[in-house]
Amino acid sequence: MAGNSGGRDEGRLRRRSLLEGVGALGVTGLAGCIRSNDIEADGPAEELIQEGFEATEIEPPFETTIAITEGTERSRFAELLEVALEDTGFFDVSVSEYKWTTYLDRLNTAAANDANALFIVSWTGGWDPDDYVNVLFHSENHTPDGLNINHYTSDTVDDYIDNGLEETDPDERVDIYRQLQEHLVADSPVSFVRVSEASHVWNADAVSGWRAYPLESGTYNAVYAPWAGVYTDLDGDEFVGDLGSDISATDPVSMNDTASSQATQLVYEGLTGVDFDGSVRPVLAEEWEQLDATTYRFTLRDGVQFHNGEELTADHVKKSFERYEGTPRESDVYDWYETIDIVDDRTMDVHCWREYGPFEKRLFDLPIVPMAAIDGDRDLESEPIGTGPYRFADYQPGDHWRLERFDDYWFGGSEGVPATPPAETVRLEIITEAASRQGALEVGDIDFSSGVPSASLSDLAADDAYGVDRRIGGGFDMVIYPLYHGPFTNELVRRGCNMLIPRRTILEDVYHGLGRPAYVPISPLLEDYTDEAFEERIAEEYVQPT
Amino acid sequence: MSLGRYVLTRVLVTVPVLLGVTALTFSFLHVLPGDPIDVIVGFRTVSPATEASIRAEYHLDEPLWKQYLLWLRDAIALEFGRSPISGRSVTATIGRRLPATLALGGAAWLLALAIGVPAGIVAAVERGEPADELTRLGALAGIATPNFWLGLILLLVFSVRLGWFRVIPPDAPLASLAMAKFMILPTITLGTASAALVTRLLRSSMRRELDAPYVRTARAKGLRERTVILKHVLRNSLLPVVTVAGLQLAFLVDGAVVVEQIFSWPGMGRLLVRSILQRDYPVIQAAVLVIGVSIVLANLLVDIVYALLDPRIRY
């Protein structure tokens, strides 16, 4: 699973899951005459598990499996989890490995098939708290429509998610999402194990002052993002970076993988941008104000040109948004968009059909494209055209992607950022093998890599020839419990398991210390929602009682 | 039947074979778990109307047999449509990857023969001598070494440590000196196992021939050993080698995924794996067709070489 979550749209129909209603609430049963008393519970986690086994009248050891995709990281992760669970005496655990596509199918059908398996999955959220909860926990997002894999169903959680999404007051939102997080940890439909970390490495003689953008899709913002007050100094006219996989699609309406977003980051621009610290900044919009709960008035920047010579107008914005209708990414826009009233060439009122919390941040991911593309004269799949500091030059699938400086870019220079980007061309080499990415960086075939194996990071950081920058990102590794099956129907069992997960060991052993242990659903990247004090309190109360 | 007619018949027989291969791939693909729509929409929620229109656009709403026929109709005109995942032309996608694959596969195949044939001859002639033992060890190592390991080691030693080669392909046309230099390591990686196979195969088949009465006769009538070996024994020993070399040719063209990964080579293997993961049906279908054609062609070539090598073989 990759990419940002799209939202949910209440107005549209969806296949109802068969299992709706079977969910988080534990079944209370008769305790006392069950064999789980024979096992001596050791510590608070095992006490909870024992209580849960008694309540569900299930005799330990309960046989189950941990389902993973192939790969050494995942199998080591699963082994550590297996040992932790088996040590309790309550579980008899095996590990099953699947090919990625088979695994996807297993995930999609797990709840419908009553699959007796714990799944280890990754998920990447973005800058808004909704990204981390909606698609995973809302009851309308049960698989196969959404990614609520264990068909978690809780009216309380649904309400929190809906209210958070439709709340535009920042303080209110923080309150809502903190309560939601606590509720989810208490109920533990999944365990959050680790938050990922962006790790960027560069050759110090070619690049200086690189800043790691926390979200993978925005990696190349660091090259030149005057709207965020950031640029990178280079020795030479060409900057050579890397991409971990081929670019799938370059038209914003069908783009949904990391490499495609990375490759087009310097080409396309939206009304707003989210800078390296998570603040919303004006990009193509010069300024905006909220007129009422659902209306925003935007003033566009003056003199913005597209790479094909068109000049940006309010009409471009309206049509760029409406272009999403009927496309794979329509929910990105139609989750909130009602219409745009054009006031004049540079002014417009954006009307949302509901109050929408993530509004300003969502605009970052909605590039404004030229009329030539809207009318179908130009195909953005073969030639992406935007307003960004770089224009598309050429793409050799499986080999490289090249951009060249756009001379008519709108930015006029400021104290911190020069008016023209230092690099004349930006070249991204497609290198799928992590060891080869490191090799290419070491011999200087590339200046920068965002995918060096985590095991090598500390060595590179200690070497003066390289620069390393690390930032906590939006990616999570988590364990999904089969809420619909056996003892896992009981939240005490799940909470006990959640306590047992050896987070530190997994972080060190599996990921070589890259990232940090996770206890709550929303990444600490979103400081307002998950600050240290909050995470510590939750961890102490539910995960690591002292 | 003359060779010409034989070739013609074989080419005609190819048609049902390719039909069968593509039909099988098509049905297997749809038995596999996973729906391309999920990938197209990036696991987002879309309205039923949108989902239906995307399905209709790529004929995913038609019954399976009809999808296949629609595909077939276009394929006959060499029109493979657009990938629903990337929106790009499938023909162009394959057209870019195929030359890279052919170049690397061809180079590895030539290397396999250039090493395997002489080594096999030496091993057979020098049976039991140090040269034989040496090639035996070499061949064993060559077959036993997994190519991902060999590739990574070569890359680490010769590119990263010694700096003799680039780690990733240079920005140069396929037919250029820079590219030829870069291809040395991937060619060795890909060709080693085949070279080892050819060596062992040729050795054993030559050993059999060397004990044949006609060899004694040839020697008895005073032919130079060199003539006996190269003109008589080698020629008669080549048939099994040709069979395997033909299959290896097809294999090298299609089976280079690992090597392509390590050396960032933009070939068919990576394209195919990626397309399967993404359920990119049109690309998979076209790639399978190309691979099917390459295997059929390799076999045809083998049959023709048979006839040239052994005048007794007539079709």
Image (cartoon, coloured by chain):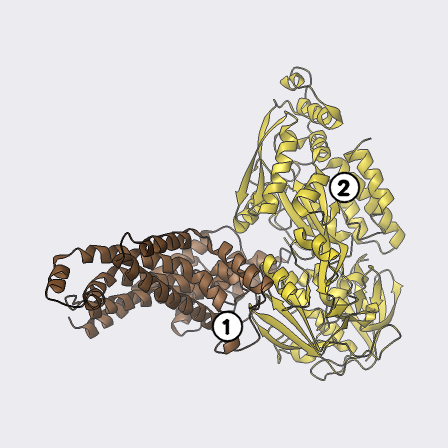
Chain colours: A yellow, B brown
The residue nearer to you, when weighing B145 against B130, is B130
Q: Is residue B200 left or right of residue A204?
A: left
Q: Which mark is residue B181?
A: 1
Q: Position of residue B309 (x, y in %)?
A: 21, 68
Residue at 41% over, 70% down: B75
* Residue located at (27% from left, 66% from top): B302
Q: Secondary structure at mark 1?
A: helix
Hey, which quadrant is residue A444 in on the image? bottom right
Disc 1 marks a residue whose amino acid type is Lys
Three-letter amino acid code at disc 2? Tyr
Q: Residue A369 placed where, x, y %?
A: 70, 75
Circle 2 chain: A
Query: Which corner quadrant holds the C terminus of chain A?
Result: top right
How far apart are labels 2 and 1 at the CA level?
51 Å
Residue shown at 62%/81% (left/top)?
Answer: A377
Using the image, determine if residue A332 lies above or below residue A173: below
**On what subunit does the disc labeled 1 rest?**
B
Spot occupied by residue A384 in the image (x, y as percentages of width and height): 65, 74
Percent x, y of residue A406: 73, 80
- Secondary element type, mark 2: loop
Of A257 and A502, which appears nearest the observer?
A: A502
* Mark 2 lies on residue: A519
